[in-house]
Image: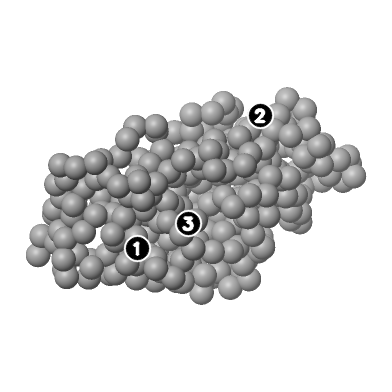
């Protein structure tokens, strides 16, 4: 019932490429999820799947509005005539707004839309009842973890989404993520993701209990075993935690009255020109929540 069609956009941000999916939902009817990028050959693979099945697309579902997930939906709508369904807060063009808990019922399939913010405000996860399958976009991926970066990324909302998925859909049999291979142990994966986020927060709190620190200093301590190429993304993760902790009055901060060193600036305001392909730079800018404004160097300390 489920076919994966991977977009030809491999990169450090997308792993082997963005996963799109085709689901047979009834006689002569298909659903597409996340057609990915607007690339002619890739969209043709979706159209070829419909021709081979002697079917047409009843709808195109989009998990969220990041540039490796939604543009292909616009192209596939033009090619197929199928409407696009997305969360009502989505800012890209769509034909039907979905809210949490809405059910899409077809002859052979029922799909439930689940609002799962955190990675993005408009993020939906789709539950295919008949196969007990979750289509998680960038909430859960098949390899590694995902970026939670302000301003659209919210760490507390993200962990709450994971906990809700574990509580309500821990009985799932498979997770089809937006990147990487299928996950055949959904309960364990969701718990792993929750534990990982709590571990990182514990490390940040413990570091600030020892001494005040800047984000670059926290990254160097906590991500010492991680490739420095990933430290700019790690800095955005740390910022997401610190925003939550500051809002809860567990952490205080002040702007340091000095310019960041070149090493500090490279973490706080990374040069996206280091990424080879312009499309990768655009995606990295969105994924890391970089607006072009210079992030100040702040000193954080525990309020305890």
Residue name at image x 31 percent, y 55 percent: 216
How far apart marks 2 and 1 lie (CA) works out to: 41 Å
On screen, residue 209 versus residue 114, left or right, reads: left
In this view, the mark in front (2 or 1):
1
10 Å crowding of disc 1: few (<14), some (14-19), many (20+): some
Q: Is residue 23 positioned above or below 64 on the image?
A: below
Q: Is residue 89 visible?
A: yes
Q: Which residue does the numbered mark 1 point to in the structure image?
A: 220
Label 3: element kind: helix
Q: Which residue does the numbered mark 3 point to in the structure image?
A: 230
On screen, residue 7 versus residue 272, left or right, reads: right
Label 2: element kind: helix
Query: Of label 2 and label 1, which has the lower sequence position?
Result: 2
How far apart marks 3 and 1 lie (CA) works out to: 11 Å
In this view, the mark in front (3 or 2):
3
Q: Which residue does the numbered mark 2 point to in the structure image?
A: 74
Residue name at image x 46 percent, y 66 percent: 226
Residue name at image x 30 percent, y 39 percent: 295
Q: Is residue 168 visible?
A: no
* Picture coordinates of residue 56, whole percent (x, y): 80, 37
């Amino acid at each position: 019932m489920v076919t994966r069609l991977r977009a030809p956009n491999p990169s450090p941000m997308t792993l082997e490429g963005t996963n799109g999916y085709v689901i047979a939902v009834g006689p002569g009817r298909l659903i597409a999820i996340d057609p990915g990028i607007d690339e002619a050959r890739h969209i043709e693979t979706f159209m070829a799947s419909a021709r081979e099945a002697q079917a047409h697309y009843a709808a195109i579902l989009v998990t969220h509005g990041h540039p490796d997930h939604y543009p292909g939906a616009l192209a596939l709508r033009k090619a197929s005539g199928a409407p696009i369904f997305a969360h009502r807060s989505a800012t890209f063009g769509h034909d039907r707004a979905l809210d949490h808990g809405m059910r899409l019922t077809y002859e052979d399939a029922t799909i439930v839309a689940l609002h799962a913010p955190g990675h993005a405000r408009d993020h939906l996860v789709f539950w295919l009842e008949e196969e007990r399958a979750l289509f998680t976009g960038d909430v859960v991926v098949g390899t590694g973890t995902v970026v939670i970066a302000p301003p659209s990324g919210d760490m507390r909302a993200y962990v709450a989404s994971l906990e809700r998925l574990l509580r309500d859909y821990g009985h799932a049999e498979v997770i089809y993520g937006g990147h990487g291979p299928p996950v055949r142990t959904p309960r364990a994966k969701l718990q792993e993701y929750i534990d990982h986020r709590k571990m990182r927060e514990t490390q940040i709190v413990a570091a600030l209990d020892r001494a005040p620190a800047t984000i670059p200093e926290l990254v160097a301590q906590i991500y010492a075993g991680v490739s420095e190429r990933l430290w700019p993304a790690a800095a955005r993760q740390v910022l997401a935690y610190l925003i939550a902790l500051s809002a809860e009055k567990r952490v205080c901060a002040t702007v340091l009255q000095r310019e960041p060193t070149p090493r500090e600036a490279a973490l706080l305001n990374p040069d996206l020109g280091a990424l080879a392909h312009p499309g990768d730079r655009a995606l990295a800018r969105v994924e890391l929540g970089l607006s072009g404004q210079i992030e100040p160097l702040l000193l954080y300390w525990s309020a305890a």
